[in-house]
Every structure is written in structure tokens, then in C-alpha cells.
Amino acid sequence: MLVQTLQRACNTATTTTTGIYTTSMNPSKMSMIESSTTPSYFQDPRDVFLTSLTDGFQLFKRSRHTAWPLLFLNNNLSPDCRFKLSSVICSGLIPGLRKPKDHDSFTYVFVEELNQAALGVSAYDAYADELFDLRIFAHLNCTDMSGVASAYTGGKHPGAKVPCHFCPIVGIRIQNTSNLSFYLPLKHPAGYPSSQFTIDNLPLRTPRQYRFQARKVDLAPTVEQRKQLSMRYGINGTPIMSKAPGVILPFSSPFNFMHLLENMCSNYVDHICGEFKGLDAGRESYILPTLRFGRRLAKQLSMLTPPYLPRLVAVFSMSRRSAPISRASLTLYGVPSMPLSSSGIVSLDQSITPIGNYQSERDRLREDIKKWYREYEEIFYQRRTERLAACVVTVHAWLQLVDMMEQSGPLWAYWCWVMERFCGHLARAISSRKHPYASLNRRIHEIQSLHAIRHIYRLEAELPPYTAMYDSADLPRYEDLNHYPEITLLHPRRVLSFEADDLDDLHR
């Protein structure tokens, strides 16, 4: 079944025409692949194009134990099945009490295997009845912004003068404070030298510049000079992933749109609640007292546990597990009286995610992003020194979205929804607090074994990738439109039965 899917995807691959780019199932059409510099890549339509993904998750709520799965997505599959858990390839897991300090020590093994896979492995094509060299490439490496910096690009975010690994813009600090972070406004406030770049003239780092700067950091004669160069360029050194065939930094490690959107929505909620890095509204009036009251109310009610309460608390709380999606919904749909720049987020989100974009559409999108960014700086930054904290790198990264689309493909091709889902899938499989990594290791081995058995023996019907954990029929809802028009109580999704669940000893 998997072979038939790959063959159908290859046969239905669309071609690139003038003015349009696409990430069809034939990876040779990817715009990031420069045929002049990499003439041997994807000459055979049977070559496999993978995307590398990694991210960390906390095993328990009250524990420092973390795990970092290393996943691969098969881009030869069609988009409707590429991002399913049954199509994900888990190649490893990085355990530890904290975030890995040296990702290169873990990814070295994968880089070695990718170098061997790029040379080709003899395989048999049953459709053509011939032997051929199966070659595998992994050009794209995706995760959140901090993960990209530490795992794929060798970047350095805290205290770096160039926080953005896509462009060479130099950040500025808030004067006369202990804040050592660099911020990225395109229009500097009074008392600072004028910015070298403008919103209409924001160049990208070229791969040659990136390699040259990383090489200078590597060859620094002393530790102090290496630290200074790292602060200057925002690069800690040449990452091991750059040695993989076809990896072109920084374009092989684009920003992840999913995390950019979640972070932007979270910042908006903090702005309108007046709790973003201690900033008030300044000369604007965008703070909504209702939301501030709602957040305080949620804190007071956090000890109650009705079924509907977690959704209410998640909008205003700082919970890392449920807040991002709730805040995104609030920002995009729930607050019509948001500032003008929030309405721009809605239109941008609707125009960024389509599968195919023509050149004219990308040009229009670029202008829309510039318009939104100008509104953002005017409302929240206001060109004042004490408000520089509003110009964080996660806001600046939106200016690079169209460039990423042109260099690395559409944003949907490398976002991390499947990574987050896989992490949640593993977290639910931990059955031992004393030996959690043994549980994760067994779970990953069982998942990959079942996927292999399913595809080899065509047991899709006998071994479905997903099983129903409860009846999908609509459950009753409890509403009181007269007294509580905005509250709906939901029925429990699963009801225990003394007989079916072997709980007769509890029955009185």
C-alpha cells in the first residue's frame, strides 16, 4: 500500500510554471534546491525527500525530565497522509533532565547515515522490475525558534546582537537598564543611530555569508574572541547538520509558522491585558479592562473543577499546555474590538496558509505584512526607548515569511503540528515514573513495528492506525439559556460500567 501511494504521488506530481512555485510530490520542483550548485539531487523521481523535526516536551508536570524525539516526514507522500502519525518516522529520542546543551553530539549519527543514504542504496523497483540506487535527502530541518538555534543552525539567541538567523539586522538594547536583550525595531527611537535597513530594504543572509561567519567563530584563537564573535553574528559555530547533503543554511531551517502564530496571539492577549513585559498602553488605548478582570477571576477560580472551567481558565492563564490554542482563538475570533493590527493577523492567517501561491499573491502578501508591521510598531512600540521590548524577534520574523516561502516552500510543508501531536502521543504512554524513558523506548519501538507490519503485509483493515476510544455519537449537553447563556456543561466522554470495566468489587 505504501509503495502504491508513493508511486501515485510521483506520477501525479505537478510541474512548476512561470510565476508559481509548488511543493508537489516531486521534490525536484522545490524552489530551495539550486540545480546549478546541486546538480545530482533528485535526478531520479524515486529519490526520497525527508524533513527533519525535533522538539522537547516535559514528561511530568512536577518534574524536570524532558525528552526530545527526532522525527522525519516523508515528503514523497501526498499532503493528506504525510502528516499523519502512521506516516511519521521516529529515528531516536534524546533523554535528559534538561534541554540538551550539545545537539551535535546526538545528531552526529543521523548526519553520518544521511551522508551514506545520499550515495544510494541498491533497491528493487517492483513496478519497473529493475534494480536502482535509492537515495535519501533531508534538506529541511524544522522546530521552534529556540530549537532551530540550538539543534540546526548553531544560533545564539540570548544576548546576540543579531538575533535573527535569516537577516543581518543588528538589534539595540534599552539604555540605562539591566536588560541585556537586543530588540529589532526597524525605526530606532530618539538617541539611537539610524537603522541600517528599512522595511522595504531588508536583505537576507546568503549561505556564503552564513558559512563564512560560522567559520570565523570556529577558528577564533581564544575563548573570549569566540564569545565576542558569537555575540556579534548570533552564531555559536558550524552545526553538524550543515554537513548533511543538500542542507543550505539558513534556508534549510526556516521559522515555524505554527509557533510564530501561537506566540503572536499570546503576545496580543498580554498586550491588551496590560501585562506584556510591564508595558502600559502609552499614548494608545488598547488595554481592555474586561480581559484583565477575566484573568484575575480565572486565578481565583483555578481550584474549582467543573467540566467547563478549564476552557475558561486556559484563555487567561499562563498554562503552557492549553493556553496557546485558546489565546489564538481569542485573538483571531473572540475579540472584535482588538487593535487594528490584530485584524491584520486574521487576514494574514487566511492568506498565508493556502497550498499554492502565485508570484502576484506573494507580492501582495508581502505588502500586507509590511502594512501590519507598521501598525504594530505604531500601536505597541510607539518609537519610545522604554517600549523597545515590544519589538521581539518573534514579531520581526513575520517580515521573513514570504522569503521563507520562496526559499523553502509553503509554510504548511514544514510546520510542526505533527511534532506536537507526536509528543502528546508519547507523553500518554509513560507508565512508570521511576523509569519513564524505558516506557518511551518501548512505545516508540511498538509504534514503528506496527507501522512496518501494516505496510509490508497490507493489514490496513486488520491493524488500523487509529482506534476509537469511545463512542463517537453525540453526547447530551446541559444548557440554561435564561440564567447562564454563555455556559454549556458537557457530558463526560466516557462512563464507567461496573461489569464492563471489571469493577464489581466496588459495587454496593
Image: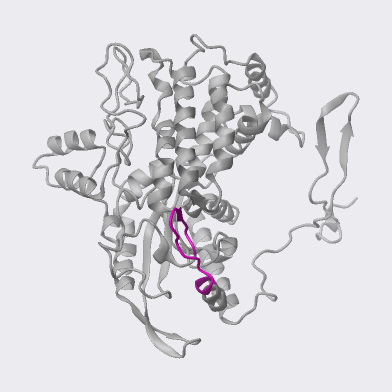
Pick the front one: 128 or 176:
128
Tell me the quadrant of the picture where the N terminus can be found. bottom right
The image quadrant that residue 124 belongs to is: bottom left
Q: Position of residue 308 (x, y in %)?
A: 76, 34
Residue drawn 56% across the image and 78% down it: 4
Q: Please identify the quarter of the rendering in which residue 70 is found.
A: bottom left
Residue 388's spot in the image, x, y percent? 38, 19
User: Residue at image x 53%, y 39%?
Assistant: 62
Which residue shows up at 40% across the image and 41% down it? 145
Check if residue 294 falls in the magenta segment: no
Residue 23 among those drawn in magenta: yes
The residue depicted at 58 percent of the width and 64 percent of the height is 81
The number of numbered discs placed on residues in the rendered structure image is 0
Residue 455 in the image: state x and y as whole percent.
Answer: 57, 77
Q: Nearer the viewer, residue 429 or 113?
A: 113
Q: Position of residue 246 (x, y in %)?
A: 31, 61
- Residue range corresponding to the magenta coloring: 9-24
Can residue 98 be spotted in the picture?
A: no
Position of 309 with respect to 473 (left or right) is left
Q: Quadrant of residue 418?
A: bottom right
